[in-house]
Image (tube, rainbow, N blue to C red):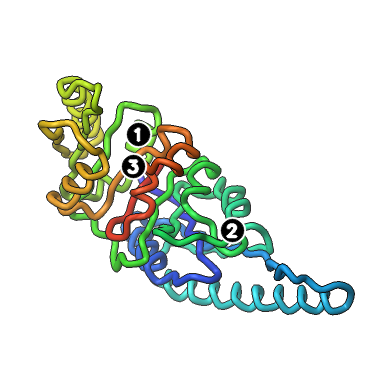
């Protein structure tokens, strides 16, 4: 039960220190091979020129990207030295999300930076909101403020849906290394707390049969799921949150907000997401 191969998606125009540190620690914990991956496309300005001038501008833009790719590869290999079982580097002049999603077939887990409140440039960075819908692999989302992979405590944000079930199964190799696991269920406004307690008890029992000791926690009152999960995560000192992604339509979550969008954007904990 391990992540034999992890893939880390590096950004061309954003810091990657947190990503590389967490990836290196995970690789050492799981004896993983690590594939570093990056992609970008030159995005011409709106006043795009014509003829020879336009070609010169394209050449300059692509040369700058190629130089940055070489820098990223060097930084990636240095960060994985002595930590990863094996390393491989992949890069392309392509849209990042499209390229990473296609290459994710080679990995058990894709590690990506959180997008917080930034408006991401799709020509230079693959964000988790896109990748979770495309890769067919679990994502480990790493906020830029995280300094290390904190496996002292983990929180499973439980909702009785296919996405949450898949996320817990995908997280087994990680949860097996966590000291304290809490399975938290939040009763919806029209839901039964007793039903949620039965569900979380089932998950705790299932985890125990995989050799993972866990406990359940269901707040006495229903309420805002985001606020309740944040409070439980803080109370338990969770360094990692495990959750299913986009239980509702993605457009509706983008408009109304939602647990998934909050988890992707928060800045203090790593989040393992599955779709």
Marks 3 and 2, the one that precedes in the sequence? 2
Placement of 204 over or under 178, stated as above or below: above
Marks 3 and 1, the one that precedes in the sequence? 1
Give the distance between the C-alpha atoms of the residues marked 2 and 1, in whole angstroms.
Answer: 27 Å
Q: Which residue is rendered at x = 45% and y = 42% of the image? A: 255
Marks 3,2: beta carbons within 8 A: no
Question: Which residue does the numbered mark 2 point to in the structure image?
Answer: 122
Q: Which residue is rendered at x = 52% and y = 66% of the image? A: 11
Q: Which residue is rendered at x = 66% and y = 74% of the image? A: 66
Placement of 252 over or under 67, stated as above or below: above
Locate the N terminus by quadrant: top left
Q: Which of marks 2 and 1 is in front?
A: 2
Marks 2 and 1, the one that precedes in the sequence? 2
User: Regarding mark 1 in the picture, which secondary structure is present there?
Assistant: helix
- For mark 3, does the 10 Å Cα neighbourhood hold few (<14), some (14 to 19), or many (20 or more) residues? many
Return the x and y of residue 205 as percentages of the image width and height: 19, 28
Return the x and y of residue 81 as percentages of the image width and height: 42, 72
Q: Which of marks 3 and 1 is in front?
A: 3
User: Regarding mark 3 in the picture, which secondary structure is present there?
Assistant: helix
User: Regarding mark 2 in the picture, which secondary structure is present there?
Assistant: loop
Give the distance between the C-alpha atoms of the residues marked 3 and 2, in whole angstroms.
Answer: 23 Å
Placement of 5 over or under 11, stated as above or below: above
Question: Which residue does the numbered mark 3 point to in the structure image?
Answer: 259
Question: Which residue does the numbered mark 1 point to in the structure image?
Answer: 164
Return the x and y of residue 139 as percentages of the image width and height: 43, 48
């Amino acid at each position: 039960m391990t992540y034999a191969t992890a893939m880390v998606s590096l950004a061309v125009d954003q810091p990657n220190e947190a990503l590389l540190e967490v990836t290196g620690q995970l690789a050492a914990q799981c004896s993983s091979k690590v594939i570093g991956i990056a992609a970008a496309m030159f995005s011409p300005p709106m006043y795009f020129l014509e003829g020879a001038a336009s070609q010169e501008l394209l050449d300059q833009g692509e040369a700058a990207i190629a130089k940055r790719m070489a820098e990223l590869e060097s930084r990636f290999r240095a960060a994985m030295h002595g930590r990863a079982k094996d390393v491989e580097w992949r890069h392309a002049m392509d849209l990042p999300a499209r390229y990473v999603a296609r290459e994710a077939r080679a990995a058990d887990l894709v590690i990506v930076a959180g997008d917080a409140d930034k408006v991401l440039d799709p020509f230079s960075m693959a964000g988790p909101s896109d990748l979770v819908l495309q890769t067919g692999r679990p994502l480990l989302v790493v906020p830029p403020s995280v300094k290390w992979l904190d496996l002292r405590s983990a929180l499973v944000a439980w909702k009785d849906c296919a996405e949450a079930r898949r996320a817990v199964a995908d997280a087994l190799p990680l949860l097996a290394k966590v000291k304290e696991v809490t399975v938290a269920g939040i009763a919806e406004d029209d839901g039964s707390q007793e039903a949620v307690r039965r569900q979380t008890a089932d998950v705790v029992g299932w985890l125990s049969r995989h050799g993972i000791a866990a406990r359940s926690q269901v707040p006495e009152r229903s309420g805002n799921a985001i606020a309740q999960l944040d409070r439980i995560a803080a109370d338990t000192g969770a360094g990692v949150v495990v959750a299913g992604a986009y239980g509702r339509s993605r457009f509706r979550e983008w408009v109304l907000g939602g647990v998934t969008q909050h988890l992707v954007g928060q800045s203090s904990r790593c989040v393992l997401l599955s779709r």
